Amino acid sequence: MIIVEKGESPLILCLPHTGVDVPPAVEKRFSATGRLQADISWRLEQVLDIARELDATIIRSTISRYVIDVDRPADQVEDPDISPRESLCPLSTLDLKRIYQADEEPGPIEIEQRKLLFYQPFHQALEEQIGRLRRQHDEVVLFDCQSMRSRIRGFLEGELPVINIGTAHGQSCSEGLKSTFVGSFAGLSGFSVAVDEALGGSYITEKYGAPADGLQSLTLVIAQRVYLRHESPPFEPDKARIARLKTALIDGFSRAIDWTKSESHLEIPNEVTQPTVGEASLEVAEEVSPQASDTTKWTPYPLVAE
């Protein structure tokens, strides 16, 4: 299922990796490691329910990235030249552990079926919302929002910074917007920031970013330690940490919206100072109850093992 909640501001929050649904015919072929789904952007939708406060549009898939990764090129299937974790239908976790039991990997026909059922509807929904908002605004900002564990052996060197921003090395958004968003975290204790470093930008960011045409696109990857109690099952959220992260993100996203409406974004501002690592001071907040989505698009699960 693709969930779309429509807003009227020029901000789109895209969540490609929060889904945990796996068709039964696929799940029974998963290994024990695959069933854990450790690489999901766990509970991130609870953080980004701030979209309503920002009048932002939010788009997310309920299908697990282990079934099909909508943040990969459609033609990036199993190939000797790419890592099994980078396939459209990944065969391994980010730390290169097998997702499927032996001889249970999806074949070409099943991959095409997954593309038809889950991949194409997601990108169609995203393109529809981009088109709708571009008809209303001179500038539209798309954030590809993800989260991951702070340490992943064989994938990350050391600990992941709290906030990771990717702009396809400056190709998917303007320097002014990047500086504006990064600057919103300056001085915040506990919010280390990296820009175009280990995570330089996702497929969605690279595909849709067209700053010269008024479509700004950035990848935002958040380290899960900043809002979860533990980065392992059951990936329990921490109310106080979530509240603090929400406050920081509302400020950052609000600045991005304001940037689209200002004349100054035609000029490149001075470079901002990167925030430094520190311990977060956490505040307790009430949990926000989820609301029904404005639009839902269903996709069925008739997948059968080959």
Image (cartoon, rainbow, N blue to C red):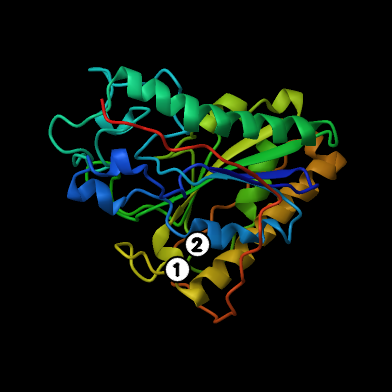
Between discs 2 and 1, the one toward the N terminus: 2
Residue appearing at x 47%, y 60% in the figure = 43
Percent of width and height locating residue 7: 76, 49
**Residue 169 seen in the figure:** no
Above or below — where is 79 with respect to 293? above
Choose top left, top right, bottom left or bottom right for residue 264.
Answer: top right
Amino acid residing under circle 2: Phe
**On the image, numbered disc 1 is attached to which residue?**
278
Label 2's element?
Answer: loop
Q: Residues within 10 Å of mark 2 (few under 14, many from 20)?
A: many
**On the image, numbered disc 2 is attached to which residue?**
191
Q: Is residue 2 left or right of residue 117?
A: right
Q: Which mark is residue 152?
A: none
Amino acid residing under circle 1: Gly
Are the residues at dot 2 and dot 1 in contact (C-beta closer than 8 Å)? yes
Percent of width and height locating residue 220: 53, 46
Residue appearing at x 47%, y 33% in the figure = 70
